[in-house]
Image (cartoon, rainbow, N blue to C red):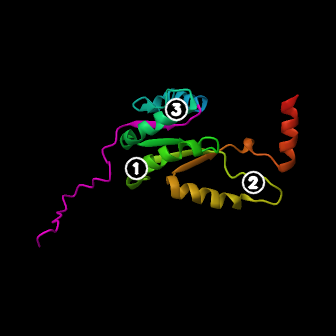
């Protein structure tokens, strides 16, 4: 038996963080979105005992670095609100991978994730149905294990509307 490890079950799971604090991490590159979420939660009397954490930097690169630095602290949160819109996701992929890695064992058990995204890009194209959500949500389900997903349907345009919207913006 020399050279072998004798592991004993101490009933302590080192990959799980069951003693989480009443913290909520709001993770977004967009300071306007992060502040809006922060203010809405902070003004709700039911949430008065929760500590809200969000990036304080305003420059994109600095904010991305701040979110990555916050990754390990997310194991203390009960709720993670994550911005996965197409503008933010590529810049935060590394930080989000770390965050999910630290919390994977506890997701939907001790810690919950709310995703804010822009939904599938072809949602309202002619002939499409809500079936386009299936591959989109399944990708995010694997990556983030969200309990809730929010998207803004007003950000979606038909192919023809994109040209009209660009033309109006130039005026």
The residue beneath circle 1 is 103
Checking the image for residue 122, the label placed there is: 2
Mark nearer the N terminus (2 vs 1): 1
Q: CA distance from mark 3 to mark 2?
A: 30 Å
Q: Is residue 70 left or right of residue 168?
A: left
Q: Is residue 38 visible?
A: yes
Above/below status of 123 relative to 37? below
| Residue 5 drawn in magenta | yes
Residue 30 percent coordinates (x, y): 59, 33
Residue farthest to the left? 2
Region rendered in magenta: 1-30
User: Would you say residue 37 is visible in this rendering?
Assistant: no
Give the structural element (helix, strand or loop) at label 1.
Answer: helix
User: Circle 3: is it few (<14), some (14-19), or many (20+) Cα within 10 Å?
Assistant: many
Side of 169 where 99 appears, left or right:
left
Helix, strand or loop at mark 2: loop
Q: Quadrant of the N terminus?
A: bottom left
Front-most of residues 95 and 3? 3
Q: Assess whether mark 2 and mark 3 are in contact (beta carbons under 8 angstroms).
A: no
């Amino acid at each position: 038996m020399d050279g072998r490890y004798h592991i004993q079950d101490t009933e302590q799971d080192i990959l799980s963080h069951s003693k989480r604090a009443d913290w909520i991490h709001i993770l977004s590159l967009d300071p306007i979105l992060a502040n809006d979420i922060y203010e809405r939660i902070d003004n709700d009397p039911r949430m008065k005992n929760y500590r809200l954490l969000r990036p304080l930097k305003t420059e994109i690169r600095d904010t991305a670095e701040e979110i990555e630095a916050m990754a390990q602290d997310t194991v203390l949160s009960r709720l993670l609100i994550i911005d996965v819109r197409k503008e933010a996701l590529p810049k935060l992929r590394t930080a989000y991978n770390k965050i999910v890695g630290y919390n994977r064992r506890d997701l939907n058990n001790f810690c919950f994730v709310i995703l804010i995204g822009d939904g599938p890009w072809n949602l309202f194209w002619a002939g499409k149905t809500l079936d386009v959500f299936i591959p989109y949500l399944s990708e995010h389900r694997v990556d983030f294990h969200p309990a809730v997903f929010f998207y803004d349907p007003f950000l979606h345009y038909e192919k023809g509307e994109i040209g009209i919207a660009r033309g109006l913006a130039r005026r």
